[in-house]
Image: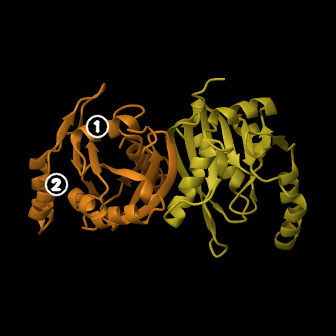
Chain colours: A orange, B yellow
Amino acid sequence: MKQQIRLLGIDDSPFTFTEKYATVIGVVMRGGEYIECVLKNQVEIDGDDATYICKDMIENTRHRKQLKALLLDGIALGGFNVVDIEEIFCSTHLPVITVTRDKPDFDKMEQALKKNFIDWEKRLTLIKNGVIHKVETSHNPIYVKCAGIDIEGAKEIIKISTIRGVVPEPIRVAHLIASGITRGESYGKA
Amino acid sequence: MKQQIRLLGIDDSPFTFTEKYATVIGVVMRGGEYIECVLKNQVEIDGDDATYICKDMIENTRHRKQLKALLLDGIALGGFNVVDIEEIFCSTHLPVITVTRDKPDFDKMEQALKKNFIDWEKRLTLIKNGVIHKVETSHNPIYVKCAGIDIEGAKEIIKISTIRGVVPEPIRVAHLIASGITRGESYGKA
């Protein structure tokens, strides 16, 4: 696989529950080293438009044709605004890879969803959909889900785009921008 | 000089003259390859707070102690909100380097300033202050001003932090972010 592969990383901004929308930042990178483009949009906090917004970012960037995969920090943006990664792949034909540092705790999520959402079963089904792969790294393991690409292909893309630590650069940089523009200075890890 | 030198690049967002403020983005990078931090602030369009905002970004980032230079896209932010680079160096002891692709046209600036500002002479003096060095590159030449560092040191920092083209990455990335968060997708060159 080429080292200069074009990847889109998406992450959301930190928010408080007094707000209605969370900012969503997309970053198009060549491999893990060169930023091509920065995109901005927003999702409703705990809404259901995250899948649509991801598809919109993919379809409307002028880098669309060069993109080889979408990298997401977990399976939701703006709280429990769950991303349907199978739907994104089916609709755009762009492979999707989600990466998290922590193993998803489905019991905890189910409790939170039941308490706050009438359509909790629908959201939980989306969250649980697909296989979570534990991927060992030279640091801590990461947890990876993919749509439209097998885990070996996903691991290769993650390896190409990770410079330091365990988080691929398109996700890490999207996180830094989303956090920095919201708080004034970026903090924390994707 | 170390390749991993920490640099702060600052650029402003595009704006229209119906707006009062322009967003200012700061990016802390190691050399030209690794983004450490993203900062956000704002300046008044055609105001006189750009010098203060640059000093504030320098002094208040948690990366302050590691910073080796400030890189600026030209000598002003938010229109004719001119940055006093000597004042920034005297006050913070951080060397400042400004980079532009085009040779400053002082006559044109003087006309624009005279037409729009009572304090045009003060702004023009600040703009004209110091020596502009024409620096040859493998592409087009760039025009460089420095405070607190000689041109040889500035050229070395520019060389370390430029990956493609002629614009150092901390400025190029600050431009992409400022442009992307304002327009939805980043456009143009710093």
Disc 2 crowd, CA 10 A, few/some/many (<14, 14-19, 20+)? many
Image: A181 above or below B15? above
| One can see residue A19 in this view | no
Kind of residue indicated by mark 2 = Ile
Discs 2 and 1 carry the same chain letter: yes
Residue A80: give x, y in percent of width and height. Answer: 22, 59
Instruction: Report the Cα–Cα distance between label 2 and label 1.
Output: 21 Å
Instruction: Say the numbered circle drawn on residue A127.
Output: 2
| One can see residue B178 in this view | yes
Which residue, given by chain and number where applicable, does mark 1 sit on? Answer: A155
Residue A181: give x, y in percent of width and height. Answer: 48, 54
What chain letter is assigned to the residue under label 1?
A
What chain letter is assigned to the residue under label 2?
A
> Which residue occupies 28% across, 28% down?
A137
Judge left or right: residue B117 versus residue A131: right
Q: Quadrant of residue B87?
A: top right
> Which residue occupies 39% across, 36% down?
A160
Residue A14: give x, y in percent of width and height. Answer: 36, 54
